[in-house]
Image (cartoon, helix red, strand yellow):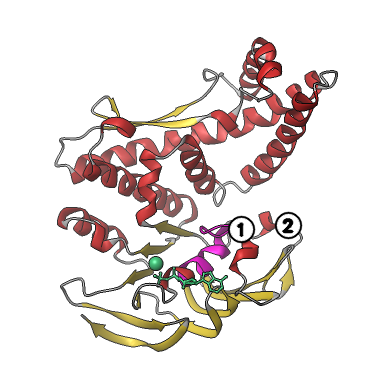
Amino acid sequence: MYITRLSLKNFRNYEDEKIEFSPGVNIIYGANGMGKTNALEAVYYFSQGRGFRGPAREAIRYGEEQGRTALEFFREGRECKGEIIFEKKAKKIFLNEIELKKTSQLVGRFVCVLFTPDELSLVKGPPEVRRRFLDSSIIPLRPACLSALVKYNLILKQKTALLKKGEYRMLPVFNRQLAEVGSGIIHMRRAYIESIRDIAAGVQSDISSGAEELEVIYSSSVRPGADRRETASLLLEKMEAMEESEKENKICFVGPHRDDISLKINGRPARSCASQGQQRSIVLALKAAQTELIERETGESPVMLLDDIMSELDRSRRDFLREKISGKQVIITCTEAEGETVGGNLIMVKDGKIIGNGDRSCF
Ligand SMILES: Nc1ncnc2c1ncn2[C@@H]1O[C@H](COP(=O)(O)OP(=O)(O)O)[C@@H](O)[C@H]1O
Ligand SMILES: [Mg+2]
């Protein structure tokens, strides 16, 4: 899979620009604050209809009513075109000129994997960050996960509203629905973790020359049931057991919205015990596993988006990453020379304007 062109109209600090990409290495180059990450975000929007820097309405250029981006890409050898119109209240998504009724129809068409320096929060941050990683990794492969999550969150909101109002009559109905939909989410997440855990452990071991053993475990409020139905009844039992506490605190304590990924290095929790370097390796390991699974399941390589990451890594991790991305389309942003020669399509950005875009070797 690779992209050929991105058009930006009133998106972030871009007024009206087009960027051409080559199938190999693309380098977005410019000083801080020029719009490099904004360009990556625009590309990322086409993978799940969401950005990674806040809500869609904030992506509209300051002072404008509407923003518009278009992405041309090749998938399974066929040319596709996606278009997103950003408006204050909503966004419209088009695929090959046809408007999609739901964002979930976009999912899985264009697949990318994003590396940013912020991603250390995958290890150090709250469970929510890991759940988001998990869900956004599963969704391109199992679009049903997105509909399940939307449904689950809606019921969860309704149940929370009842707890807040102190109206408990409908509680059992909501609990049953949450258990039903929630068990499906838990099963998809567990299955996903099962598929990436060995790959991630292998990567961690490679980077550390065998010194670090990484364990990736799905940590849920209920023990694994044999099947969805059993998990649903375990969830329901737990909700009933927690009912008094839920009423008292007006919080839903049980379900996939409280789950987490447990990451351990040599048996110790990575969140509190891993060094900065080990944490970086864990992020690389998880992302590499995510990439490999996409390739295995779809037969195509995702587009790799690397935001300011190379300068953050030491030599061995950088070499590892370079090997992982070879043969795939890569879009790298950087502000200064990496100290070596990189050939590729150089895209120069200055204040939201593309001032250079063509094949050359740089640095
Ligand atoms: N909605 C917006 N409208 C106009 N400018 C924006 C918007 N959102 C962010 N920006 C501007 O984009 C710039 C940051 O761009 P960014 O892509 O993060 O730069 P970098 O090249 O460092 O990655 C900032 O100057 C910020 O003010
Ligand atoms: Mg940036």
Direction right: furthest residue:
169
Q: Give the percent coordinates (x, y) of residue 232.
A: 66, 21
Task: Sort mark 1 into few (<14), some (14-19) or many (20+) by Cα contacts within 10 Å.
Answer: few
Q: Amino acid at mark 1?
A: Pro
| Residue stretch rendered in magenta on the structure | 39-54
**Residue at disc 1, CB closer than 8 Å to ligand 1:** no
Specify the principal SS of the magenta part.
Answer: helix
Residue 75 sits inside the magenta stretch: no
Q: Give the percent coordinates (x, y) of residue 318.
A: 22, 58
- 165 or 309, which lies in front? 165
Mark 2 or mark 1, which is nearer to you? 1
Residue to which mark 1 is pinned:
55
Residue found at x 36% / y 88%: 358
- 346 or 277, which lies in front? 277
Distance from Cα at disc 2 to Cα at disc 1: 17 Å
Q: Quadrant of the C terminus?
A: bottom left
**Quadrant in the picture for residue 109:** bottom right
Q: Mark 1 or mark 2, which is nearer the start of the sequence?
A: 1
Q: Is residue 19 above or below residue 193?
A: below
Residue 51 sits inside the magenta stretch: yes
Q: Is residue 271 above or below residue 323?
A: above
Residue found at x 46% / y 40%: 130
Direction front: furthest residue:
63
168 vs 311, left or right, is right
Q: Is residue 268 above or below residue 20?
A: above
Residue to which mark 2 is pinned:
102
